[in-house]
Image (tube, helix red, strand yellow):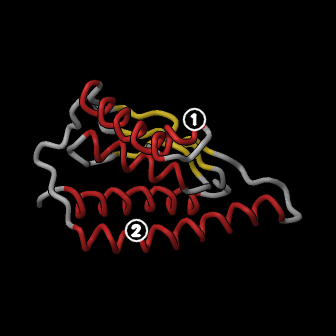
Amino acid sequence: MVMWIILVGEISWGNIVAGLVVGTLVVYLLPLPAMPVAGLHISWHKLAWFLVEFFFELLSASLNVAWLALRPQQLPKTAIVTAPMRVSNEFILVLAVTLYNLQPGGAVTDIDIANRTLTIHLLNADNDERIEQELARVKALEARMIKIFERT
């Protein structure tokens, strides 16, 4: 309905009703493919806690990347590394990759679904310790996704 009103450009009762009708028709006549969520179990309290932690990690990563951009030194070395992922559901794998890509400092460039391996481009890879820290972040994200979405 909101998109319909934005498209039409005028708020009126007729446009609100038309938006509801068009939205309902689109949902029922043009359904999206089924999500691969078989066997998925969501632990809501763990998900809520993860979102709080994720916000602070996002803030920290943003400040780190801002410091890398503004500091009076040379840009750091970058690296491309591979990281294994143990999540069993492809939907959760894609969700984990999306969450990782939202945080500045690294980006998944390739997903090998068959081998459950991610290829990651790291922004700050000056030494082996920084690379290990980033791989530990990926492993921690993977562990949280498993705790939140998979029955163990």
* Residue named by callout 1: 8
Return the x and y of residue 93 as percentages of the image width and height: 32, 44
Q: How far apart are the alpha carbons under marks 1 and 2?
A: 36 Å
Q: Residues within 10 Å of mark 2 (few under 14, many from 20)?
A: few
- The residue nearer to you, when weighing 68 against 54, is 54
Find the residue positioned furthest to the top.
Answer: 29
The secondary structure type at the circle numbered 1 is: helix
Residue at 55 percent of width and 65 percent of height? 58
Residue 61 placement: quadrant: bottom right
Q: Is residue 71 above or below residue 75?
A: below
* Residue named by callout 2: 51
Return the x and y of residue 67 as percentages of the image width and height: 76, 66
Question: In this image, 20 relative to 121: left or right?
Answer: left
Sequence-wise, which precedes: disc 1 or disc 2?
Answer: 1
Residue 102's disc is: none
Disc 2 residue type (three-letter):
Leu
Residue 51 placement: quadrant: bottom left
Q: Quadrant of the N terminus?
A: top left
- The residue nearer to you, when weighing 70 against 51, is 51
Disc 1 residue type (three-letter):
Val
The secondary structure type at the circle numbered 2 is: helix
Residue at 56 percent of width and 47 percent of height? 11
Return the x and y of residue 68 as percentages of the image width and height: 75, 61
Q: Nearer the viewer, mark 1 or mark 2?
A: 1
Question: In this image, 38 relative to 25: left or right?
Answer: left
Residue 84 placement: quadrant: top left
- The residue nearer to you, when weighing 14 against 44, is 14
Residue at 15 percent of width and 50 percent of height? 40
